[in-house]
Image (cartoon, rainbow, N blue to C red):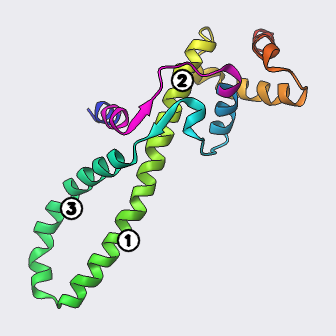
Amino acid sequence: MLEKLKVNIISYIYNISKQPVKLHELLEANALFNEGMKLDGTRLGFRLRTGRAYLVFMVLIHIIIIPMAFLAHELFAILDCHASIIVAMVFTAFLFGIFNYFKDWTRDSVTRERIKQMWVLHFPHFPYSEFNIEVSNIYEKAKDDDIKNVDLERYILDNLSS
């Protein structure tokens, strides 16, 4: 259920290209992703629709905020209005901070899925979960050996099969 919701959210807030990703771009993205770096979505063919991201985030947050507001209403009715104002300011700052984590989470999810999709296209006989680190290491070695992009696929496949 949650996985389906995640897929629906991602497909709504991201514009994902149907065009395949070039091999050297896939390898570069995989290497950077394995290192924990944030990737530019245009390399893998996706773009965030910011307005839709804010809309989905606000809907998700309101699912949490509304019940909390009903529970805290009695307490804030009794307290001084200054306390309510301070809590509102802190909560607003918290929400905008959480939005950045939401964007990062969705971008990482889209990046991982897009790499897996393109992996099947370029390396159909080598499962992503087993070979992504090994291919990343081979790619780094290929960059050090100045292997051209034309010969990159053969170089990687030769190293994987040996």
Number of numbered tags placed on the structure image = 3
Residue at (34% x, 49% y) in the render: 51
Under mark 1, the amino acid is Ala
In this rendering, would 107 be left or right of 133?
left
Residue depicted at 14% across the width and 61% down the height: 67
Q: Mark 1 points at which residue?
A: 93
Rendering coords of residue 101 (x, y %) = 45, 54
Decide if residue 23 is on the left or right side of residue 143. Answer: left
- Quarter residue 89 falls in: bottom left
Determine whether 88 is above or below 26 in the image: below
Whole-angstrom CA distance, mark 1 to mark 3, is 14 Å
For the C terminus, the quadrant is top right
Identify which residue is drawn at 40% across, 42% down: 49
Relative image position of residue 137 (x, y in whole percent): 77, 29
Question: In the figure, residue 143 lies in which quadrant?
Answer: top right
Label pair 3/2, CB-CB below 8 angstroms: no
Could you say where residue 152 lies in the image, as x and y percent from the top left? 79, 17
* 10 Å crowding of disc 2: few (<14), some (14-19), many (20+): some
The tag on residue 65 is 3
Question: Badge 3: few (under 14), some or many (20 or more) residues near its Cα, within 10 Å?
Answer: few
Q: Earlier in the sequence, mark 2 or mark 1?
A: 1
Closer to the camera, 130 or 32? 32
Q: Earlier in the sequence, mark 1 or mark 3?
A: 3
Tell me the tag on residue 116.
2
Q: In the image, 58: left or right of 53?
A: left
SS label for mark 2 = helix
At mark 1, the secondary structure is helix
